[in-house]
Amino acid sequence: MARFRVLTAYLVTMAVFSACSPPQGDEPGAEPSPRTITSNPPAAQQGPCRSVEPMLHEAARSVIGDITIARPGVEGDADRVEVIVCKTSDTRATATVTILGQRDDSVRDTRHELVLDKLVVDGWVVSNDVTTHRCQPGRGHQEFSAELCL
């Protein structure tokens, strides 16, 4: 009986730690880092959203190119990236990609509001990208806007 309790405690501990440990890498095909948040809109905001395939998330994330996410011991380009995707039909989706905590003297955060279309040959492609910025304190507006930062 004692062995069973020890084994159960070990398995529970391993499950908790593996669920909390950060996946490594932001490379294509790798699991996103804990600071890259990829999700669907919250249920209350989903409306007509359909289930989203991984290629759609990859297409949305591709608009920002390669960004190194800061980690302990690694200086990065930003603190984190958030990707929220809503597939509205079999061939159309919207996405919001937000880069938070940028290492820039004037721009703090950047947001891309995307429309993606599924093309038979190319898969998901970005057909519209509206980019806005939030400025560093003292460098301009503090809300997302198309206005340039100082």
Image (cartoon, rainbow, N blue to C red):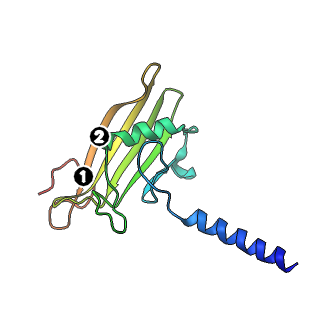
Please provide percent x and percent y for residue 34. Answer: 46, 59
Say which of 32 and 42 sits in front. Answer: 32
Query: Dot 1 corresponds to which residue?
Result: 133
Vertically, is 136 above or below 113?
A: below
Query: Looking at this rendering, what residue extends furthest in the top direction?
Result: 121
| Residue at horizontal 20 percent and vertical 63 percent from the top | 136
* Residue at point 70%, 70% (across, down): 12
Quarter of the figure that contains the C terminus = bottom left
Q: Is residue 133 left or right of residue 58?
A: left
Q: Position of residue 30 (x, y in %)?
A: 48, 47
Which numbered disc covers residue 145? none
Looking at the picture, which amino acid does disc 2 mark? Val
The residue furthest right is 1
Is 90 situated left or right of 5 in this image?
Answer: left
Q: Quadrant of residue 109?
A: bottom left
- Looking at the image, residue 127 lies above or below residue 71: above
| Amino acid on which the number 1 mark rests in the picture | His
Residue found farthest to the left:
150
User: Disc 2 designates what residue?
Assistant: 130
Quarter of the N terminus within the rendering: bottom right
Q: CA distance from mark 2 to mark 1?
A: 10 Å
Give the class, few, some or many, for how many residues have Cα within 10 Å of label 2's Cα (few <14, many ≥20): few
Note whether 36 is above or below 13 in the view shown.
Answer: above
SS for callout 1: strand
The residue positioned 50% from the left and 57% from the top of the image is 23
What residue appears at the point 81 percent right and 77 percent down from the top-left corner? 5
Foreground: 68 or 6?
Answer: 6
